[in-house]
Image (cartoon, rainbow, N blue to C red):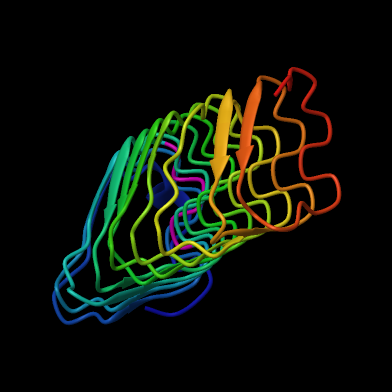
Amino acid sequence: INDMAPFTGTAFMTTKAVVEEGITRLGNCFLYSFGELKEIVLPSTVTEIGSKAFEYCVKLADIEFGSANIQLGESAFRDCDSLTEIQIHAGITLSRYSFYSCDNLKRVWIDCAAVPMNAFEFCSGMTELVLTDRVKTIGSRAFGQCQSLISVTLPETLTEISESCFYGCEKLEKIDFPESLQIIGKSAFSGCGFTQVDIPGSITMQENAFSNCKKLEWVKLDCEVVPRNAFSGCSALTE
């Protein structure tokens, strides 16, 4: 199906869309801003969903990806505020802003190799995040400003937490770093809700890694270098 909003007029009142078997690609802005759309049925033949394909489909509550391998374009499901849970299996390739600002998305399970930058940023209702051992990289700001996030499971395959990855996750009070982790990027956990942090010697921190964690009271460091402003603005820090 070609790019750029192929439907007009009363189509915007559609509540259910069924894509026929044999179609392989949904173009950019496919059902962009279909405000009444609640359900989408995808066939096993669709392997690509274009940029902004379902952006602002604010009543879309459920997605089932029919294909084992599918590429999601930039902002494909951005601002789909009725989504509450999503499972990203191994064959799905995410793009930047894929689920950006899905305000009621609470539970996210990811089993693909890479989470790109900004993919779930500003998902303010997210409470639980599970990343399986298939996940190797997490892009910058991928989960930034997920202000309700309280539970994060990081994989033993992860080597780097990128810049601002979890910034502004103010309810995130605890996280277990995998033994594989080597780098905590700039401002990765800035503004989080940690009360205690234990940094083993195998991890290298970058600037502002834990800055403005206002509840942080206790820090244990076993690393050789503490970078500039790593804990700046941590006003409750006593030890």
* Segment tinted magenta in the rendering: 53-58
> Who is closer to the viewer here, 151 or 107?
151
Residue 194 in sight in this render: no
Q: Position of residue 113 (x, y in %)?
A: 36, 72
Looking at the image, how many numbered discs can be counted on the residues?
A: 0
Q: Position of residue 149 (x, y in %)?
A: 47, 31
Q: Quadrant of residue 7?
A: bottom left
State which quarter of the image contains the N terminus: bottom left
- 31 sits to left or right of 20: right
> Who is closer to the viewer here, 39 or 185?
185
- 46 sits to left or right of 237: left
| Image height of 16 relative to 1, above or below | above
- 37 sits to left or right of 12: left
> Who is closer to the viewer here, 135 or 77?
135
- 13 sits to left or right of 184: left
Residue plotted at (53% across, 71% down) = 4
Residue plotted at (57% across, 59% down) = 203
Q: Quadrant of residue 54?
A: bottom left
Residue 106 in sight in this render: yes
Q: Position of residue 86 (x, y in %)?
A: 30, 47
Residue 216 counted in the magenta span: no
Per the picture, the main secondary structure of the magenta-coloured stretch is loop
